[in-house]
Image (cartoon, grey):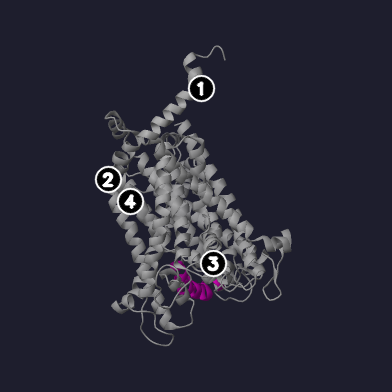
């Protein structure tokens, strides 16, 4: 410590009277007041988040006490005898989101590659804006189109085709209703693709041009450059876009509610109707009679909240580490 | 050319065309949705749709005037509660914030942004509907307002940071105190961007249905004040679309077109406003 320059020493431990005086001067000029007011509003974001967690926790006390952890893997959802388990909804949510991601990731990353690597910059910007418009379409509208257009097409065309070609898999067996897990997955695909495209494109564009030039100079084709050099470089960012899309798919409510079939059963077949966490909350919340019923729905909300927070948190951390690495080694 | 080279070139062409096909597929979904809504909804969108109350089941005609006004009311409450918090929070992050605390605020805002909208509905239900004992426009507006906060915080911060440092230095060099520089120079310089960000955030929550289902609920009639169950366009679209009546389906298409037109107009308008500026923050 003794070897430190005096100036640093002084700054690290200022005489308290001087600090108070500076604060009072700041107050008089208004700086400290403005600082405190804006600080209060910034801090209110913590407050709101904390309140959100607290309310979800407090209002789901009854089923937590009643069912404990069993709530998460009970298959029964019986409002009449007040026996509630979340498993059918967790199953429906996970299955629809995974199928949606299976379809959306290749589609989204492919489109992002086209927009970032092939299309001229101005066309790419225009197309990306259109893709972002697709993300702006309210989910209830996607749901309306889902009911009236997608479901009939799924029933008359998609499901018979899948049954004929892949019918040996248990996934594609059973009666074909149109409404069901498959329709919900398709609707979710439409809703998450724009996210994957716009974030992945951004990440791909951030890959230094030298990487591409080096690969091309070594004789790689355009595709080899993209697939073996650019995409691996942008890997973390693309992963995080997939995570963000997953979080969105898990929490998506309206469009799924309208086409999933609303049946709390676990079926191996994608043709069968199912139920998702968000959909059951949307459908049954206003009809919930009895505190245990209502609080079970709120506990489902808590489950959804915790899962999406974890996935979002991971995705944001991934994005942060990649952007930091990019700025550290330009 | 060796066989290997031909193969590599073929893979190149095939895969690159596939990526183009992916982009084309995604875009065609947008155009299909737009086209179909215009075709289906356009023929049922009329003056009486905009000015009349919903007709009882079985009766032809009727409109969604109450839902249009109701959506406006909800957005007003949302704007009054969410925008000031978001704006001032954003000013803090851009102008006054330190390092760790700002990072935490930003991170929390991002997480809040990712919370499913239906959970926001439960939140508003527990803090407004349960104590008051009935559904109200206030509850729905608050749910939307909370959703606005993280979006407005981030966009405000981004646009404030895009203000050139020279403006800041100029104001301070003229002897302005920090808050005066912020209030009279920096915020006005970024005003257009900030306002656009607010417009976009409103457009985003305008289409939200899930948080309204059990907060503002719905209403077949006019609701007076902010303390009653209130109809809103998204909820009307939902209830009409899942109803068994053909006439209601037609109304749902018309309402869907109206909602989509408003949301897309806000988005395109914001884009045009921003592209006029030289540096578009991304």
Is residue A154 rendered magenta in the image? Answer: yes
Residue position for label 3: A184
Labels 3 and 2 share a subunit: no
Residue B226 coordinates in the image, percent (x, y) = 42, 67
Q: Which residue is mark 2?
A: B277
In the displayed structure image, the side of residue A70 where residue A40 appears, left or right: left
Chain holding disc 3: A
How far, Cα to Cα, is label 2 from label 4? 14 Å
Which residue occupies the foreground of this view, A21 or B281? A21
Indicate which label's residue lies in the foreground, 1 or 2. 1
Q: Magenta part of the protein: which range?
A: A140-159
Reply yes or no: does residue B176 show up in magenta: no
Q: Quadrant of the C terminus of chain B?
A: top left
Q: Nearer the viewer, mark 4 or mark 3?
A: 4
Q: Say which residue appears at 67% left-offset and 68% top-offset.
A: A292
> Depth-wise, is mark 1 or mark 4 nearer the camera?
1
Q: Secondary structure at mark 1?
A: helix
The residue wearing badge 1 is: A12
Element class at badge 3: helix
As measured in the structure, the alpha-carbon distance from the residue carrying label 1 to the one carrying label 3 is 59 Å
CA neighbours of label 2 inside 10 A, class few (<14), some (14 to 19), many (20+): few
Q: Nearer the viewer, residue A223 or B236?
A: B236
Question: In the image, is A305 to the left or to the right of B246?
Answer: right
Residue assigned mark 4: B195
Specify whether disc 1 shares its chain with disc 2: no
Mark 4 element type: helix
Relative horizontal placement of residue A109, taking residue A262 as reference (left or right): left
- Front of the two marks 2 and 4: 4
Q: Nearer the viewer, residue A284 or B216?
A: B216
């Amino acid at each position: 410590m003794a070897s430190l320059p005096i100036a640093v020493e002084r700054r690290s431990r200022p005489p308290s009277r001087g600090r108070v005086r500076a604060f009072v001067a700041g107050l008089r000029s208004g700086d400290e007041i403005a600082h405190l007011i804006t600080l209060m509003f910034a801090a209110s974001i913590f407050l709101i988040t904390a309140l959100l967690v607290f309310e979800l926790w407090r209002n789901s006390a009854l089923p937590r006490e009643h069912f404990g952890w069993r709530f998460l893997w009970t298959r029964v959802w019986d409002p009449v005898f007040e026996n509630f388990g979340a498993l059918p909804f967790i199953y429906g949510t996970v299955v629809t989101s995974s199928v949606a991601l299976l379809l959306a990731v290749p589609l989204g990353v492919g489109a992002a590659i086209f927009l970032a690597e092939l299309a001229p910059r101005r066309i790419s910007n225009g197309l990306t804006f259109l893709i972002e418009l697709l993300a702006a379409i309210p989910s209830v509208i996607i749901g309306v189109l889902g009911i009236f257009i997608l479901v009939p097409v799924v029933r008359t065309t998609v499901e018979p085709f899948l049954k004929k070609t892949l019918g040996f898999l248990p996934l594609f067996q059973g009666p074909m209703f149109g409404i069901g897990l498959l329709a919900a997955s398709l609707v979710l695909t439409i809703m998450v693709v724009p996210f994957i495209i716009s974030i992945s494109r951004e990440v791909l564009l951030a890959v230094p041009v030298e990487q591409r030039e080096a690969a091309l100079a070594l004789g790689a084709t355009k595709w080899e450059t993209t697939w073996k050099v650019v995409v691996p470089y942008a890997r973390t960012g693309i992963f995080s876009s997939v995570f963000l899309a997953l979080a969105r798919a898990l929490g998506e409510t309206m469009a799924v509610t309208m086409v999933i079939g609303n049946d709390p059963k676990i079926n191996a077949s994608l043709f069968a109707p199912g139920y998702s966490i968000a959909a059951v909350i949307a459908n049954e919340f206003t009809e919930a009679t009895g505190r245990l019923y209502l609080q079970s729905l709120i506990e489902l909300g808590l489950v959804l909240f915790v899962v999406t927070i974890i996935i979002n948190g991971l995705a944001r951390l991934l994005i942060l580490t990649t952007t930091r690495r990019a700025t550290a080694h330009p | 050319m060796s066989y290997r080279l031909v193969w590599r070139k073929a893979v190149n062409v095939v895969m690159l065309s596939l990526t183009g096909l992916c982009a084309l597929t995604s875009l065609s979904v947008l155009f299909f949705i737009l086209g179909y809504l215009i075709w289906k909804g356009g023929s049922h969108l009329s003056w009486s749709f905009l000015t009349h109350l919903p007709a009882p089941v079985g009766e032809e005609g009727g409109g969604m005037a109450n839902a249009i006004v109701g959506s406006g009311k909800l957005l007003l409450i949302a704007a009054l509660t969410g925008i000031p918090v978001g704006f001032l929070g954003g000013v803090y992050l851009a102008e006054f914030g330190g390092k760790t605390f700002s990072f935490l605020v930003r991170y929390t805002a991002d997480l809040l942004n990712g919370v499913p909208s239906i959970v926001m509905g439960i939140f508003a239900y527990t803090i407004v509907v349960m104590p008051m004992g009935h559904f109200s426009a206030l509850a729905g507006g608050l749910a939307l307002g909370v959703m606005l906060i993280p979006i407005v915080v981030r966009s405000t911060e981004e646009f404030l940071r895009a203000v050139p440092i020279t403006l800041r230095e100029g104001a301070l060099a003229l002897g302005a105190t920090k808050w005066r520089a912020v209030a009279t120079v920096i915020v006005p310089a970024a005003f257009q961007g900030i306002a656009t960000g607010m417009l976009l955030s409103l457009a985003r929550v305008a289409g939200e249905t899930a948080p309204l289902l059990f907060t503002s609920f719905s209403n077949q009639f006019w609701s007076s004040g902010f303390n009653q169950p209130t109809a809103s366009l998204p909820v009307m679209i939902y209830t009409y679309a899942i109803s068994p009546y053909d006439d209601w389906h037609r109304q749902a298409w018309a309402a869907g077109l109206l909602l989509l037109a408003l949301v897309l107009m806000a988005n395109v308008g914001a884009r045009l406003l921003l592209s006029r500026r030289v540096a578009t923050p991304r």
